Image: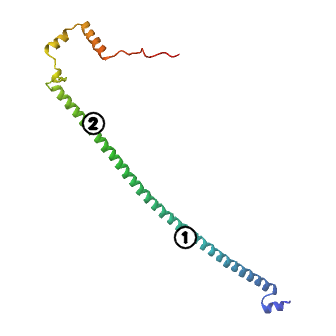
């Protein structure tokens, strides 16, 4: 190619090739950029979906925790009421027992005071049947008997009551 041809076209063949190559590179870069933007858009959508799912899961867990806390609070309240009722019952029984003991002490104290202040003997006289009544003389006589006389009477009474054992009819067999 001569200078005339270059001047006609205004550009040389090499220059045209360089421009074409630059244009192709530019188009390829733009295409790669569009692909990259598409890829990033897809990635961003995935990330946003993951974030949305995580937020939903977090909200769901938060609600579950709140429900669980509410349930546990109700259980605690029921347990507290039960414990208080048991404590009140124990206190009531304790008070009743103390009252019963106090009343028992008071009753015993009154009985003791009545016995202490009573103008009566602290022994009981038993009366014998009419046919078995002893006269005053017999009582005095019994009191005045000596020790030997009492012992002799005792032996005589025992001999009358206890019969001797008859062993003459028993034989020893060897």
The structure residue drawn at horizontal position 26% and vertical position 39%, both measured from the top left corner, is 100
Depth order, front residue of 56/88: 88
The structure residue drawn at horizontal position 27% and vertical position 14%, both measured from the top left corner, is 157
User: Which label's residue is closer to the chain start, 1 or 2?
Assistant: 1
Depth order, front residue of 107/124: 124
The structure residue drawn at horizontal position 17% and vertical position 29%, both measured from the top left corner, is 114
Location of residue 69 (image quadrant): bottom left
Q: Secondary structure at mark 1?
A: helix
**85 versus 65 height, above or below:** above
Residue 144 is situated, as x and y percent measured from the top left of the image, at 19, 8
Q: Secondary structure at mark 2?
A: helix
Residue of label 2: 101
Q: Quadrant of the N terminus?
A: bottom right
- Furthest residue in direction right, as rendered: 1
**121 versus 71 height, above or below:** above
Residue 16 is situated, as x and y percent measured from the top left of the image, at 78, 86
Q: Is residue 31 left or right of residue 135?
A: right
Q: Which numbered circle lies on residue 52?
A: 1
* Badge 1 density bin: few <14, some 14–19, many ≥20, Cα 10 Å: few
Depth order, front residue of 99/111: 111
How many numbered marks, from 0 up? 2
Q: Is residue 150 left or right of residue 2?
A: left
Location of residue 130 (image quadrant): top left
**53 versus 90 height, above or below:** below
Q: Marks 1 and 2, Cα distance to the nearest angstrom?
A: 72 Å
**155 versus 56 height, above or below:** above
Residue 164 is situated, as x and y percent measured from the top left of the image, at 36, 15
Residue 89 is situated, as x and y percent measured from the top left of the image, at 33, 46
Depth order, front residue of 30/112: 112
């Amino acid at each position: 190619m001569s200078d005339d041809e270059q001047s006609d076209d205004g550009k040389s063949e090499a220059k045209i090739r360089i421009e074409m190559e630059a244009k192709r590179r530019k188009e390829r870069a733009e295409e790669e950029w569009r692909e990259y933007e598409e890829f990033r858009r897809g990635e961003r959508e995935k990330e946003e979906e993951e974030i949305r799912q995580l937020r939903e899961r977090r909200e769901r867990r938060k609600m579950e925790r709140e429900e669980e806390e509410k349930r546990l609070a109700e259980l605690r309240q029921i347990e507290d009421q039960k414990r208080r009722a048991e404590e009140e019952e124990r206190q009531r029984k304790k008070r009743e027992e103390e009252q019963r003991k106090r009343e028992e002490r008071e009753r015993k104290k009154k009985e003791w005071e009545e016995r202490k202040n009573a103008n009566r003997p602290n022994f009981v006289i038993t009366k014998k049947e009419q046919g078995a009544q002893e006269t005053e003389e017999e009582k005095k006589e019994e009191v005045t008997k000596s020790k030997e006389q009492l012992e002799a009477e005792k032996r005589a009474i025992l001999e009358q009551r206890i019969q001797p054992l008859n062993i003459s009819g028993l034989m020893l067999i060897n």
